[in-house]
Image (cartoon, helix red, strand yellow):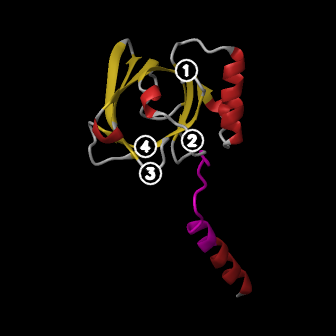
Amino acid sequence: MLQRLLYLLVSLGKLFTVRKEPQVPILVDFDAGKYLGQWYEIKRLNHIFERGITDASAEYTALEDGAFLVTNTGTKNGKKQQFVAIAKPTAVKNFYKIFPQKFPFVKADYRVAWVDADYQYAIVTSTSFDYLWFLARSREVPEPIMQQMLDISKQLGFDTDKMVE
């Protein structure tokens, strides 16, 4: 009887356990205006909606009320792919809600976890350890910056060994 009760308590504990998420810092000095423009995807955790995509980049264009249009492009099987979404600001400057154009009732969290002082390099994630991107204004990232991005991501709890280029 005691063994069954213990099993039940452990099972219920697993059922109601809150899933851990990356503790992305609030960037109080984040400037969305400086973040706008062209970014290249340098590395990412591979996930289903980007699997097989190469030469990925994103263009961020200002919209009303602090929102921006996100136009992602890349190549898959020799064909250009495009994914468009709108990022709407939240109460936290570096946190946004993304609404994909093809799926208007879907929303996702977009969090700028780190950006360098000159807005040349950035780390982006979500509320899950499944999503992580390293972005840069050019396709080349100096080794010390890459190491800094890897170190920051590891401190946030990400397994950077699973990232693809």
- Image quadrant holding the N terminus, namely bottom right
Q: Mark 2 = which residue?
A: 27
Residue type at numbered disc 2: Leu
The CA distance from mark 2 to mark 4 is 13 Å
Q: Give left or right: position of 16 versus 64.
A: right
Q: Which residue is mark 1?
A: 120
Residue bearing mark 3: 91
The residue under the point 34% across, 16% down is 80
Mark 1 or 2, nearer chain start: 2
**Residue occupying the point 58% across, 44% down:** 129
- Of 7 and 103, nearer the camera is 103
Question: Which of the two discs, 2 and 3, labels the residue nearer the N terminus?
Answer: 2
Q: Amino acid at mark 3?
A: Ala
Give the SS element for disc 1: loop
Residue under label 4: 96
Q: Residues within 10 Å of mark 2 (few under 14, many from 20)?
A: some
Q: CA distance from mark 2 to mark 3?
A: 12 Å
The answer to which quarter of the image holds residue 44 is: top right
The CA span between labels 1 and 2 is 16 Å
Q: Position of residue 125 (x, y in %)?
A: 53, 39
Q: Main secondary structure of the magenta part?
A: loop
Q: Which badge, 1 or 4, is on the more N-terminal residue?
A: 4
Question: Magenta residues, as a range?
Answer: 11-24
Mark 2 or 4 closer to N-term?
Answer: 2
The amino acid marked with disc number 1 is Gln
Cα–Cα span, label 1 and label 4: 19 Å
Vertical side of 41 occupied by 124: above or below: below
* Left or right of 35, for residue 12: right
The residue sitting at 32% across, 23% down in the picture is 82
